[in-house]
Image: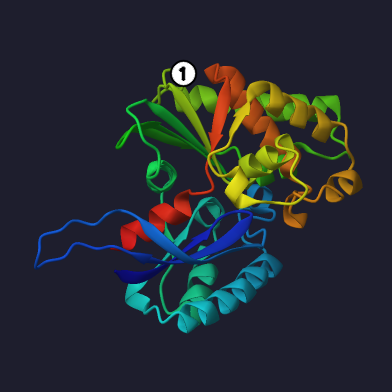
């Protein structure tokens, strides 16, 4: 076993996973099991992508929020004894799009001692697929959708990725682009739906999104919708992980969110405070995907790109 750490820095949140990972034994020739023993997993809403869709730059206050979280994570990583050679820091949509991403890179290097890898959308999709499907059994063809803050990844495959595409629809990006009222107006909701449908048209050019047998959903928008659909009194990752949420349940949650104000959403215990203002757009993305693909249900995974990054360290 070797101890690894993975950091996923997205548009809305930054997350850390510290885990023990089986690696190949050179003496015995035994292969890695691909199983992670989780030691610490945490998430902080930093909204790194604040305003990026409009300005093309990372805001100074967004960078500082992210660096504060990095300092906390650096201390956790030290406590678990993970060296820099076993830490992988991956940055996704917001830092990919920003003109001043070098400010972000320099700050991360100064705090953690490793350079963040600003990965492509296709790389993001592959990590998400590996992390999400590692525990799933069967030979069914899966469509994995990772609904992030700035982008959504569509990946089809079983044990291996057949096709993948990242498109620029995410809960933060769509909220900043279209929402001006609370709750969103009918026109704003229609604009969000139109963007999602156009993005799915792009994804469908390279990914057979309607041909998979199982839909697997990842990331905070999906897990939050699942928590609401399950009627959980508080967020419970064990009950959410591998739950199956029907299309009718998703539609019910969407209707509830569309009819609620910011304060009413904030009073729902399972919605993280950092997601209150963007969960409506995130839920709409999921609902549109289910309508387009004809999926009767979505299998919800708490394991995602972060797990894929950790597995890649070995």
Residue at the spot 74% in from the left edge and 56% down from the top edge: 274
Residue at the spot 90% in from the left edge and 48% down from the top edge: 263
> Residue 144 in the image: x percent, y percent?
46, 35
Residue at the spot 55% in from the left edge and 20% down from the top edge: 295
> Residue 164 in the image: x percent, y percent?
39, 34
Front position in the image: 182 or 132: 132
The image quadrant of residue 88 is bottom left
Judging from the image, the colouring scheme is rainbow
Front position in the image: 102 or 38: 38
* Circle 1 residue: 210
| Residue 88 visible in the shown view | yes
Front position in the image: 223 or 60: 223
Dot 1 alpha-carbon crowd within 10 angstroms: few under 14, some 14 to 19, many 20 or more: some
Quadrant occupied by the N terminus: bottom left
> How many discs appear?
1
| Residue 149 visible in the shown view | no
> Residue 16 in the image: x percent, y percent?
52, 65
* Left or right: residue 311 compared with residue 183: left
Quadrant occupied by the C terminus: bottom left
Q: Is residue 20 above or below residue 152?
A: below
* Left or right: residue 151 compared with residue 123: right
Helix, strand or loop for disc 1: loop
Front position in the image: 245 or 258: 245
């Amino acid at each position: 076993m070797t101890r690894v750490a993975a950091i996923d820095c997205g548009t809305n949140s930054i997350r850390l996973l510290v885990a023990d990972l089986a690696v190949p034994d050179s003496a015995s020739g035994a292969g890695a099991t691909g199983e992670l023993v989780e030691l610490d997993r945490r998430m902080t809403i930093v909204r790194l992508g604040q305003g990026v869709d409009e300005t093309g730059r990372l805001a100074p206050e967004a960078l500082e929020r992210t660096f504060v979280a990095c300092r906390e994570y650096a201390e956790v990583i030290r406590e678990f004894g993970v060296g820099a050679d076993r830490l992988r820091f991956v940055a996704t949509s917001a830092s990919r799009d920003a003109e001043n991403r070098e400010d972000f890179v320099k700050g991360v290097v100064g705090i953690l001692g490793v350079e963040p890898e600003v990965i492509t959308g296709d790389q993001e999709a592959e990590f998400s697929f590996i992390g999400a499907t590692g525990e799933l059994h069967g030979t069914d063809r899966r469509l994995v959708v990772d609904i992030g803050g700035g982008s959504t990844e569509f990946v089809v495959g079983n044990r291996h990725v057949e096709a993948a595409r990242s498109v620029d629809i995410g809960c933060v990006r769509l909220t900043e682009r279209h929402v001006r009222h609370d709750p969103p107006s009918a026109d704003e909701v229609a604009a969000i739906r139109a963007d999602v449908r156009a993005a799915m048209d792009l994804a469908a050019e390279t990914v057979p999104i309607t041909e998979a047998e199982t839909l697997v959903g990842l990331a905070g928008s999906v897990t939050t919708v699942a928590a609401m659909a399950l009627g959980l009194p508080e967020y419970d990752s064990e009950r959410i992980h591998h739950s199956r949420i029907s299309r009718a349940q998703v539609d019910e949650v969407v209707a509830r969110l569309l009819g609620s104000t910011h304060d009413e959403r904030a009073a729902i215990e399972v919605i993280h405070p950092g997601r209150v203002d963007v969960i409506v757009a995130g839920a709409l993305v999921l609902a549109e995907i289910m309508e387009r693909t004809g999926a009767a249900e979505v299998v919800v995974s708490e394991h995602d790109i972060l797990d894929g990054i950790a597995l890649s360290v070995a």
